Image: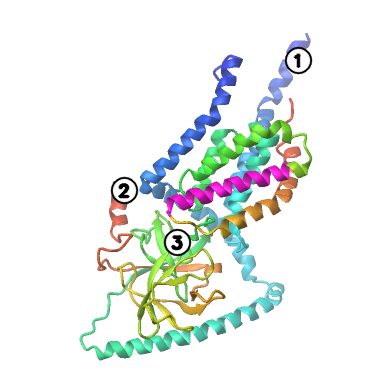
Amino acid sequence: MARPTTMWRRRAAGPWRRLDAISRAMFPAIMLVVGLFLLGLPLDLPGQAALRPVFTMGCVFFWSLYRPAALPAPVVVGIGLLLDLLGLTPFGLWAVLLLLMQGLTIALRRRLVPAHFLLTWAAFSALSMLATGLEWVVQSWFVPAALPWQPAGLQIVLALALYPALAAFLIRVHRGPAAVELV
Amino acid sequence: MIRLSIPLRQILSRLTLPFMLMLSLGFVLIGRADQNFTDHLRSGLDDILAPAYMLVSRPIVAAENGTGALARLLSLDSENAALRRENARLRQWQEVAMALEAQNKALKSALNYTPPAAPRFTTGEVVADLGGVYARSVLVLVSPAAAHGLTGAIAMDGRGVAGRVVAAGGRSARVLLITDLNSRVPVALGASGAPALMAGTNGPDPALLYWRPGHPPVEGEMVLTSAAGGAFPPGLPVGVVHYNAQHDPVVLPLADLDSLRVLRLFSYPDEQPALTPISHSRPAHAHHARSR
């Protein structure tokens, strides 16, 4: 007798709950795309061109660390291509860089998740330095000429400085609108 | 959904990342091999984004303009600063006028002078600031009627050359600014029109290269575009020569590149020599091919 009633309840709540679950699962990806769009507005912020890759790197690192299922590799590729098309970086470059970042983050996951925030911050700094350095190398190779290092340096500094704020925001998102509820 | 056995699913999930990495590397290769492919994708995306940006940025522009009385009070200070900047710019314009006067005299002395054909132009609003770390570009929303064959058009704000259209879609145009690393503009210095090359450095002021040996640019000289190479028409105002802290000559652009709002895009008649890096007629063919 108990079984039919539970079946009925689950079916009644089904579509809404599924919609809720889907929106929660897609929240990180949608937030990334909307953020990239908004950072293109002519806001005249200092270093605005560098903010887009910094925001993307921060989000990819954070979600890969705390919820790898939130940003599967194909989504990361899509976001990388979007970043390449929005900025004028060589097509596919950021897709490769973000995937490398995600791979390394997932490899380091077991050590980083229980660690102190300072350690994750250091890890992110190292990874963003690596990605920006690779970006500089590849772009210089494609031009071909040694590009100035200052913009890359600015990007690294911004990544370093803005990660705590971004992480604080993403932790709220992680617990709030994007939290996975076990149904 | 297909139900797979757990080990198979684990193998698949492990292979996703390497597979996607190979795919992305493939994208890089495709982008390197065929620049047109990337340009098409980019202008397609720009066409979608430009109206969306327009929609979002309208309230921001309204707030910036500050229509209310309180907003006007608050903007007094910035207005003052703007007027001061305007004054400085007008002084620069005085020099433009003087340079043009000198040029005019020289031209009148040449009796068989025929004025160049008038350019076609369209005006568009700057809706997005889409640069990268190594790129300076803005997205301009243009009316679909005027968007045809805009690639290669020269973008000017009210004061001087801001850049050049590198990719144009159905209703958007992407302008590469003169401060971009890839920007090279042949220029003429001062009233004498001594040739030099203005190269973008990614910083606010482009550098001056290849001036005539023994005749370095003079501080405060006007910089106008030169027809050398055929990419630009001669005589458009670009900026003023200035020596920076490293004693290298740079150009202070007349155009307000940090806060571009409206750009005029000038398409010049296709009469320039074949050296032009971006052909003026290519996009027309491309457009025909797409519309077929």
What is the number of the mark on residue B291?
A: 2
Q: Which residues are magenta?
A: A120-144
Q: Secondary structure at mark 3?
A: strand
Kind of residue at badge 2: Ser
What is the number of the mark on residue A5?
A: 1
For disc 2, the neighbor class at 10 Å (few under 14, some 14 to 19, many from 20) is few
Gap in angstroms between the C-alphas marked 1 and 2: 59 Å
For disc 3, the neighbor class at 10 Å (few under 14, some 14 to 19, many from 20) is many
Residue that label 3 marks: B176
**Viewer-closest of B4 and A183:** B4
Kind of residue at badge 3: Leu
Kind of residue at badge 1: Thr
Among all residues in the image, which is located at the extreme front? B214
Identify the residue shown where x is 27% and y is 77%.
Answer: B116
Q: How many marks?
A: 3
Residue B260 highlighted magenta (yes or no): no
Among all residues in the image, which is located at the extreme top? A1
Question: Where B61 falls versus A53 (above or below)?
Answer: below
Residue A124 highlighted magenta (yes or no): yes
Closer to viewer: mark 1 or mark 2: 2
In the visual, does A7 lie left or right of B210? right
